[in-house]
Amino acid sequence: MGYLKWGGSAVLLAAAFTAFAGGASAAPTLTCPSAGTLCTGTITATATETMTINIGIGTDKCTTSTISGTIESNTETEATGAISTLDFGGPCTLSTTTTSVGSWTILPSGEVKLIGSEVTISAQGTTCVYGGGASPGTKIGTLTGGTTATLPVKAQLPKISGGFACADPAEWTGKYSITTPDTLLLK
């Protein structure tokens, strides 16, 4: 009977250890300011080159742009949160207004997706609305982690509304540097 008790205890101990080890090995998608440190809070990306959005009837060029938001959930499969700022300016060559900031998702590969974001661009009497789309969102680029991480943007933004002259999709290109936090690392 002593063997039965010991065998049962060993099975329970092994199960508990396995559960603990499984939970401990799950690394978050983003770490900052150093590897292994869970990153939550604000992330701010500032344009380091002109943002260009080709809408078919014109090309919008903005010399400044900022994307800022929080990381509210940071798991081994993705980091997600609300965007608080999505702006284009400097000024832009076309009338450009952000009508919805939406949210973002960052995958362990560095892929950044916008969800529910909308930007209205007007040219030649036509108004075109483009956005990040519904979940799972629209990929805008791939983040490269490091001290002063970077986000080159090369995106195909779906047309939400606008006349036949509005391109579908619009092509968005440019580059951001992550200014907060100074060091942002990927899993």
Image (cartoon, helix red, strand yellow):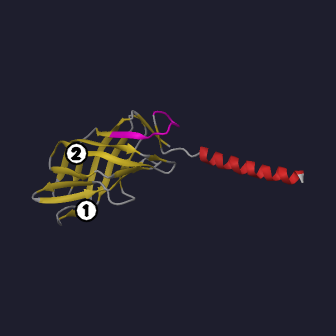
> Residue 1 sits in which quadrant?
bottom right
- Residue under the image location 89 percent in, 51 percent down: 2
Q: Position of residue 105 (x, y in %)?
A: 40, 51
Callout 1 amino acid: Ile
- Residue under the image location 16 percent in, 64 percent down: 165
Q: Is residue 80 left or right of residue 15?
A: left
Magenta highlight range: 33-44
- Work out whether residue 142 can be spotted: yes
Callout 2 amino acid: Phe
Q: Residue furthest left?
A: 125
- Residue under the image location 29 percent in, 54 percent down: 117
Q: Position of residue 119 (x, y in %)?
A: 23, 53
Residue 71 forms part of the magenta stretch: no
Q: CA distance from mark 2 to mark 1?
A: 18 Å
Q: Are marks 2 and 1 in contact (CB under 8 Å)?
A: no
Residue that badge 1 annotates: 160
What secondary structure prevails in the magenta region? loop
Which secondary structure, mark 2? strand
Compared with 7, 33 (above or below) is above
Q: 60 or 17, which lies in front?
A: 17
> Residue 171 sits in which quadrant?
bottom left
Residue that badge 2 annotates: 88
